Image: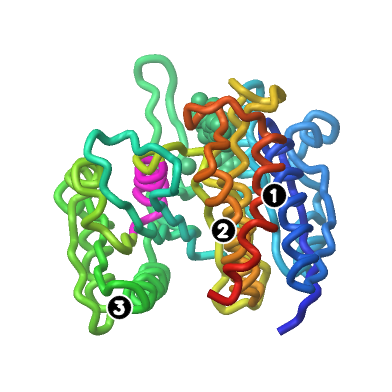
Amino acid sequence: MSRSHRISVIAGDGIGLETVPAAIACLDVIADRHDLRLEWEELPWGTDHFRRHGRMMPTDGLERITGTDAIFLGAVGDPEIPDAETLWGLLIPIRREFDQYINLRPARSLPGVPSVLARDVPIDLVIVRENTEGEYSSVGGRQGSGDHEIAIQSAVFSRRGVARVAGFAARLARSRTGHLTSASKGNGIIHTMPFWDEVVAEAVDGVEVRTVLVDALAAALVLHPDRFDVIVASNLLGDILSDLASAVTGSIGVAPSANLNPERRLPSMFEPVHGTAPDIAGQGLANPTGQIWSGALMLEHLGHPEAAAHLTRAFEHALASGTRTRDLGGTATTSEFTAAVIAGIAATESERAA
Ligand code: NAI
Ligand code: MG
């Protein structure tokens, strides 16, 4: 396994410009301690690029990052530019062109992070979201005008697409507690969702899967989040459930995600679940935990589980010691929390062999 990696960095917009440098500062210290070399290639893509050039990234953008080992992304989006431009101009092309068909979104109770639930139960689950097809399709359009205007959007589910995400989720469940839940809506969406249910049941290969309608699942995630382990879901349902699950653990600011190309033929992308948070951007208030945790997922994917575990211990140590950003009820700024994580790297060094 190589100890030297080239990483494309797209900080993007809003708080991405604050959380990405914060996470890189932590990753550089971790790399140093674990004898790794991380070479960051910073790409100024996002809405500034859009304002100047009419595109979120250059026409050869994907070619420029295809040879790197991973992509580390902040978030993209700006209140003045339609989300369709920002998402479909950068994020979605990367996920699709690099066939990052797994979007892994862990949600776990963290030390020192108060749950929003009255009943504080330990949460440790992973949402496996399909990331390349489903409801996020460009098939459809608008027709007519005035009162007669209509909009049609078609969801596209392929047997191969559903089977591969279900197979991945089943293997992950087997490596954890063995509990797999599939989010469905087969009672209301009568073509694609029964197809999803059928292909998932075939693809999980020996793992028992519990299919739950997504509305009931949303309620159950609030009432009994401790009863879930791995949840497999389509693109839209997984997107919604993962914001819900992360908010239940304390804040959307802590939630990480990995967009994986499991075959490793193409680079995978690591980014927090949250967006650009225009309401707090530029004020030093952003919680960088989701970005730092995404960095830990990246280290793991690159073959450095020890470094990943050390970085995870370090941000948990910072949270447990009471340094918290405002979203978690604290007063720490982004840079104060980052400094606490860096101090946590030294403080949790001795647990390395544990
Ligand atoms: P958001 O996640 O940016 O913000 C939702 C709420 O959570 C806000 O009140 C925000 O202040 C808070 N929040 C989010 N992250 C935080 C952090 N790290 N620390 C402290 N508080 C945090 O979602 P919203 O407002 O729906 O979207 C804003 C923009 O971001 C939109 O343009 C949207 O399209 C874009 N977006 C981009 C994503 C991406 O690049 N992957 C994902 C989600 C949204
Ligand atoms: Mg989302």
Q: Residue furthest left?
A: 187
Measure the C-alpha gap from mark 1 to mark 2: 13 Å
Quick check: can you spot residue 146?
yes
* Highlighted range, magenta: 233-246
- Residue 242 lies within the magenta run: yes
On screen, residue 71 versus residue 82, left or right, reads right
Q: Which one is nearer the viewer's eye here, 122 or 196?
A: 122
> Disc 1, ligand 1: is the CB inside 8 Å?
no
Dot 2: what SS?
helix
Q: Residue at x 23, y 84 (%)?
A: 206
Residue under pointer 3: 203
Q: In this picture, is 179 found above or below 26?
A: below
Q: Amino acid at mark 1?
A: Ala
Q: Quadrant of residue 130?
A: bottom left
Residue under pointer 2: 312
Q: Amino acid at mark 3?
A: Ala
Residue 109: x, y in percent?
Answer: 39, 49
Q: Residue at x 63, y 33 (%)?
A: 77
Residue 113: x, y in percent?
Answer: 43, 40
On screen, residue 202 versus residue 163, left or right, reads left
> Disc 3, ligand 2: is the CB inside 8 Å?
no
Residue 218: x, y in percent?
Answer: 25, 43
Residue under pointer 1: 343
Q: Quadrant of residue 181?
A: bottom left
Q: Residue at x 43, y 25 (%)?
A: 144
Instruction: Mark 3 or mark 2: name the one nearer the start of the chain.
Output: 3
